[in-house]
Amino acid sequence: MTDKANHDTSDRADAEPDGGAVASETQAHSETDYLTSEVNLLRPSTPFMRDHLRVIWTGFVAWAVIVFGPVTLTAVAPGAMTSTMPVLGFPIHYFLVAVGAPGGALVLAFWYARKRDELDEKYGIDHGGAAE
């Protein structure tokens, strides 16, 4: 029977605060040969691929809502969406499609760049952008 009340922490001085999960994922990612590895979009093989696909799918869902949301709302509630905005004088669906969709795409591009930079930092990916 093991004693679960006493935990010897003397040999854990160099332990990672995350249990070494990030360091081991980084090492596993650096050892992966992506040219010969099979890539399955539904079951990614590495933690980096899983995290990256999570970012991509989240962005895709946000993009679909931004692009198709105003059109769908206009079909569902034409009275509210075709009413004129008081300040600009445009119907709401015109404004959302003309300004909301391109602006949303710009925000999504910024969001994706930030998320990708976070993933690169998490997994130790260096793009070697140092100019000489």
Image: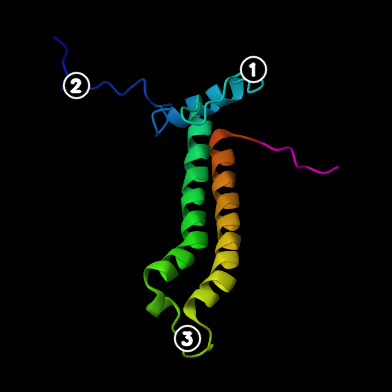
Q: Amino acid at mark 2?
A: Asn
Residue at figure coordinates x 23%, y 22% from the top left: 7
Q: Are marks 1 and 3 in contact (CB under 8 Å)?
A: no
| Secondary element at image label 3 | loop
Give the residue at the far right of this rendering.
132
Mark closer to the chain start, 1 or 3? 1
User: Which residue occupies the foreground of this view, 15 or 85?
Assistant: 85
Q: Which residue was labeled with disc 3?
A: 85
- Residue 127 lies in the magenta-colored region: yes
* Rendered position, 50 above or below 65: above
Residue at figure coordinates x 47%, y 41% from the top left: 54
Q: Quadrant of the N terminus?
A: top left
For marks 1 and 3, give the CA distance. Answer: 56 Å
Q: Which residue was labeled with disc 1?
A: 36
Q: Which residue was labeled with disc 2?
A: 6
* Rendered position, 95 above or below 114: below
Q: Are marks 2 and 1 in contact (CB under 8 Å)?
A: no
Task: Examine the image and state in which quarter residue 125 appears.
Answer: top right
Task: Give the extent of the magenta segment.
Answer: 126-132
- Residue 21 lies in the magenta-colored region: no
x, y percent for residue 99: 58, 72
Q: Amino acid at mark 1?
A: Thr
* Rendered position, 97 above or below 50: below
Mark 3 surroundings: few (<14), some (14-19) or many (≥20) residues within 10 A: some
Q: Are marks 3 and 2 in contact (CB under 8 Å)?
A: no
Q: Quadrant of the C terminus?
A: top right
Residue at figure coordinates x 50%, y 90% from the top left: 87
| Secondary element at image label 2 | loop
Residue 50, label in figure? none
x, y percent for residue 69: 45, 63
Residue at figure coordinates x 37%, y 68% from the top left: 76
Q: Nearer the viewer, mark 1 or mark 3?
A: 3
